[in-house]
Amino acid sequence: MKLILAIVNNDDSNRASSALVEAGFFVTKLSTTGGFLMAGNSTFLIGTEDNGVQTVIDTLKKQCITRRQAMDTTASFGRGLQHMAPAQQVTVGGATVFVLDVAHMEKF
């Protein structure tokens, strides 16, 4: 049994969770914020048997696309630093996926 933690951009979140549910997976969705860009993300918790891991990863790859967007250079420092620096092009989207072994699981 595996626990998959997938950090997904909010723009891809609904599409990805719907595709995972359609594929038969149970998904718990948590609202999270990234530390670098201070942008909204969703973190999915997905429990699956070992043979379902690749299906989850393939589904996420299909639904979570990367794209370039202009981002204020002070975004990672919080809202207190508002000097007029030019925006930078950054890559957003995609997913970061962790696959963890699960020693025991019960559902009741």
Image: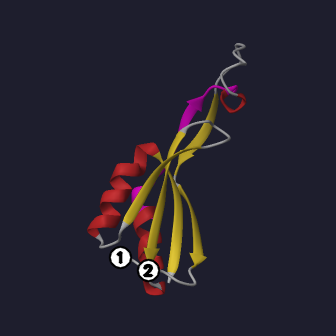
* Image spot of residue 71 (x, y percent): 60, 30
Circle 1 is placed at which residue position?
Answer: 108
The mark found on residue 65 in the picture is: none
What whole-number distance in Å separates the C-alpha atoms at marks 1 and 2?
Answer: 7 Å
Is residue 82 left or right of 59 when viewed as pictured? right
Task: Quadrant for the C terminus, please.
Answer: bottom left
* Image spot of residue 26 (x, y percent): 35, 68
Q: Is residue 45 above or below residue 3?
A: above
Residue reaching furthest left? 22
Circle 2 is placed at which residue position?
Answer: 106
Image quadrant in which you'd find residue 83: top right
Mark 2 closeness class: few <14, some 14–19, many ≥20 residues within 10 Å: few
- In this picture, which residue range is highlighted in magenta? 61-74
Task: Write the residue at 30% across / 65% down.
Answer: 21
| Element under disc 2 | loop
Queried whether the magenta region covers residue 3, the answer comes back as no
Task: Write the residue at 65% across / 29% down.
Answer: 75
Pointer 1 with pointer 2, Cβ within 8 A: yes
Q: Is residue 81 above or below residue 44?
A: above
Q: Nearer the viewer, residue 102 or 56?
A: 102
Three-letter code for the amino acid on which mark 1 is drawn: Phe
Is residue 106 left or right of 5 when viewed as pictured? left
Q: Is residue 52 above or below residue 16?
A: below
Three-letter code for the amino acid on which mark 2 is drawn: Glu
| Element under disc 1 | loop
* Image spot of residue 37 (x, y percent): 63, 37
